[in-house]
Image (tube, rainbow, N blue to C red):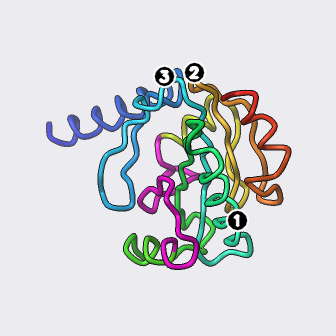
Amino acid sequence: MRIFLITLSILLTSIGSVMAKNLYNFSIQDIDGNTVNLDKFKGKPILLVNTASRCGFTKQYANLANLHREYFEKNLIIIGTPSNSFHQELSNNEDVKEFCLVNYQTKFIISEIIEVKGENAHPLYSWIFSEYNKTPKWNFYKYLFNGEGKLVESWSSMVKPDSKKITRLIDKLI
């Protein structure tokens, strides 16, 4: 009976994630272990970026920090999701937090370390895959959501977060 209830709970959680209509149906744990319900950002665009501390694109943390400073007053929400899905993240949340603060003075939301692809992907990334057929191919993939929580565009690691390609769309959304 216990196994049945556990299996049923997992199944219902999976179904709930797939049935979510937009980004605001999800929550994440921040780097300090606090729950961040994304519905508190309704009406605001969100830039979601899967990150890693030991990647050739890690310097994009500086671009994200600049973007955050430039758009903070304009209500752009930036969420970095450290991930070891590509085997380039530090081993624990405390080290990631220290790395980000010391090296990049990050002030935007950073989640706990999560998986962003495959069977163990965080429900948010599973939803992005099921809803939009998009999955990060590497670290620093970027997803821009509008104020209704719908995906507007995504970019590969090669596109810097503060590039004109991205900021032009952000400007249209705010």
Callout 2: SS: loop
Instruction: Let me know if residue 133 is in the magenta part.
Output: no
Sooner in the amino-acid sequence: mark 2 or mark 1: 1
Main secondary structure type of the part rendered in magenta: loop
Residue in the image at 78% along x and 34% along y: 169
Residue holding disc 3: 19
Is residue 2 positioned above or below 34 on the image? above
Sooner in the amino-acid sequence: mark 3 or mark 2: 3
The amino acid marked with disc number 1 is: Gln
Q: Is mark 3 in CB contact (under 8 Å) with mark 2? A: no
**Span highlighted in magenta in the image:** 100-123
Residue in the image at 85% along x and 44% along y: 165
Number of dots carrying numbers: 3
Residue holding disc 1: 60
Callout 1: SS: helix
Mark 3 to mark 2: distance in Å? 16 Å
Residue in the image at 43% along x and 71% along y: 97
Mark 3 to mark 1: distance in Å? 32 Å
Sooner in the amino-acid sequence: mark 3 or mark 1: 3
Q: Is residue 48 left or right of residue 173?
A: left
Residue holding disc 2: 148
Callout 3: SS: helix
The amino acid marked with disc number 2 is: Glu
Residue in the image at 36% along x and 51% along y: 29
Q: Residues within 10 Å of mark 1 (few under 14, many from 20)?
A: many
Residue 148 rendering spot, x and y as whole percentages: 57, 21
* Quadrant (top left, top right, bottom left, bottom right) of the N terminus: top left
The amino acid marked with disc number 3 is: Met
